[in-house]
Amino acid sequence: MLSLFILAPLVLLFVLNLPINFIGKLAFWLAGVLFFSQVLLVLLHSVFAWSAYPDFLNSFFIFNLYIDNLTRVMFLTIGIVALVSLIVAQGTIVQERQKFNFVNLLLICVIGMNAIVLVRDVFSLYVFIEITSVASFILIALERNKSAIEGTFKYLILSAIATVFMLTAMAFFLLAAGDLSFAAIHSAFYNPGASSILKLAAGLFLCGLFIKSGVAPFHGWVPDAYSAAPACVSVLLAGITTKVAGVYVLLRLFGSVFILSPAFANILLFAGAFSIVLAALAALTQDDFKRMLAYSSISQIGYIILALGCGTPLAFAGAVFHFFNHAIFKSLLFVNAAALEKQSGTTDMNKLAGVGSKLPVTGFTSLIGMLSTAGIPPLSGFWSKLIIIIALFSAGKFVYAGIALLASVLTLAYFLSFQRRVFFCKPVLAESTLSTLGNAGRTTFGLRFCEVSLCIITVVAGILIVFIHNNGILPLRGIFW
Amino acid sequence: MIINLILLFGLILAALWTVMTVRLIRSIVGLALTSAILSVVMYRLHSPLAAVFELSVCSGLISVIFVTTVSFTQRMSKEDLLIRRKERFLKYWYLPIILIVTGLLLSRYLLTPQFTLIALEPVKGVDVRNLLWNTRHLDLFGQVVMLLAGALGVVVLFKESKK
């Protein structure tokens, strides 16, 4: 049953590319049904218990796929963000051919991400990280303009460096553990004769994953890639792709495969805090909405890395919850950016001044997304940040807890500045341009649907925190060590 | 040992030349040379299959694709050539430093190994073909998806749109 998560998108990819005329026109709906099924399967897991069904493909192939609560959270997040990205593409990409190409590449991205969360072998993990990255490179350059190519090129070069780090690390893992499975590497960490080479390998892997996650100071590619990509690709990249290919792998490896030594814990804590502060300060100085969101994304990833460095089960559970929340509210904010860009043709905040009155849904949902990012109660972002800060305090990391707390004020500052400039300021666009805003009808229905749906998830996840804590967060604590 | 050292220095010099040379054709030759030396190293490390792949694909096929691509480009003007020749040493000043620091760091682990090479014993005698086809099905599946992604990339990025 588990192999269906990677085989179903591949089968759909082949079906869509069959030489049948009408099949291309169904691409959006078929992909939508597939992603919705993924979300539904995860939500109804307790009803169907599908992961317990034997995998009939195991008689033909040896796939060695495993599932746990962390994998389920990832499946849910991947399904939601892929669905949102698809709907945004339907509303923002004009050419039918380009829309079809986007669906194909999105399916490849989903295959890569689903496989990343299912495998338990470092080499297979690397193969699927690369598949996700290659699909992302092409997606960023989809519009083939200069800034898109530049963004792709930066991502490509830094990804190549990350690849070198990860491949070298794998060579050392193989030398010291004799196998690249998670279990073999984990056991090798308890072998005193192999500890030094394994630490070196883990350090190299960490460098590679920092680049893939866009953690400061390896974040150079993130603002260019996020802002140059088409709107639907920005949603996908910021919402899930870089998180699964980088942050999830960090959580999985440093949570249950490698031993988190004090040195690594300090590196993670410092990198997390550095990312939070540096990116929040950089976000304050941005004029472009999408670039500001990109820096905000780097800052929020810092919280997850900080929790990882804390190294307690509660901190890990908080990190996974923040991962989910961040995917939802960052997707929401990028959908808002897509709506603004579609209606006004720009993401420059100076030119967008005062458009809020014409786009009430976008204005309201962006406010919710921003308040959740800044950690304002009772929204979901508040609870995940609270769990991380409590975990830091409990572990005696008072300075880092203080940084995490104060950085929320910085987050609130740059988001309030955005709200004031875009939604509560006198308009600078011509009246004729402004009069067309909010009247695009069917073309923006999909965007509004995504805005409202993601906003509801953000609010409901905050209100139902007790239910989520008991059924989602507490079971996560058992995964780590 | 001496042959290994000569190969290692040859490999580094060829790689540096690939990065630092101004003309693209020379860079391609440097890359092919790097791959060729690497295949010799792989052969000496008792990996003849990997050596053959490295020689035929990386040194041969990829060089042909690069040369084909370069044949579509224009020759650089003499002024630009002179400027770039002057700039290249300033541009890549950090490369030798990275090389030396990495070498020193790795030598701490590799010249005086403080670990047991448990990988060597079980892998000895295992045919790489059996290993790949019988135990790494998921990675082979990954290769198929990667090829599809590459093909889509060519279609999306290089196909001229109808006007």
Image (spheres, rainbow, N blue to C red):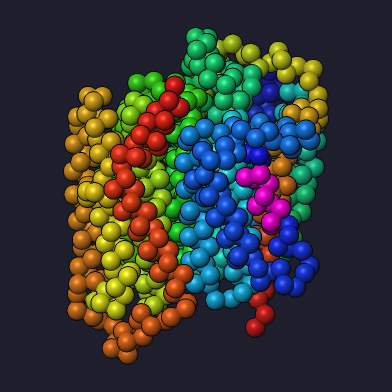
Q: Quadrant of residue A22?
A: bottom right
**Position of A466 relative to A100 (above/below):** above
Q: Quadrant of residue A130?
A: top right
Of all residues, the one furthest to the front in this rendering is A47
The residue positioned 29% from the left and 73% from the top of the image is A360
Q: Nearer the viewer, residue A55 or B148?
A: A55
Q: Nearer the viewer, residue A145 or A451?
A: A451
**Residue B34 in view here:** no
The residue positioned 49% from the left and 72% from the top of the image is A91
Of all residues, the one furthest to the bottom in this rendering is A432
Which quadrant of the rendered structure holds the N terminus of chain A? top right
Which quadrant of the rendered structure holds the C terminus of chain A? top left
Residue A5 is inside the magenta segment: yes
Marks counted in the figure total 0
**Position of B23 relative to B14 (above/below):** below
Residue A295 is inside the magenta segment: no
Q: Mostly what secondary structure, the magenta segment?
A: helix
The residue positioned 69% from the left and 23% from the top of the image is B4
**Position of A97 relative to A185 (above/below):** below
Instruction: Provide residue B134's location: percent of width, then percent of height.
Output: 78, 29
What range is drawn magenta here? A4-13
Q: Nearer the viewer, residue A75 or B48?
A: A75
**Residue B163 in view here:** yes
Instruction: Provide residue A344's location: percent of width, then percent of height.
Output: 37, 78
Instruction: Provide residue A71's location: percent of width, then percent of height.
Output: 51, 37
Residue A202 in the figure: left or right of residue A418: right
Residue A334 in the figure: left or right of residue A212: left
The residue positioned 77% from the left and 49% from the top of the image is B61
Residue A34 in the figure: left or right of residue B29: left
Instruction: Provide residue A102's location: percent of width, then percent of height.
Output: 59, 64
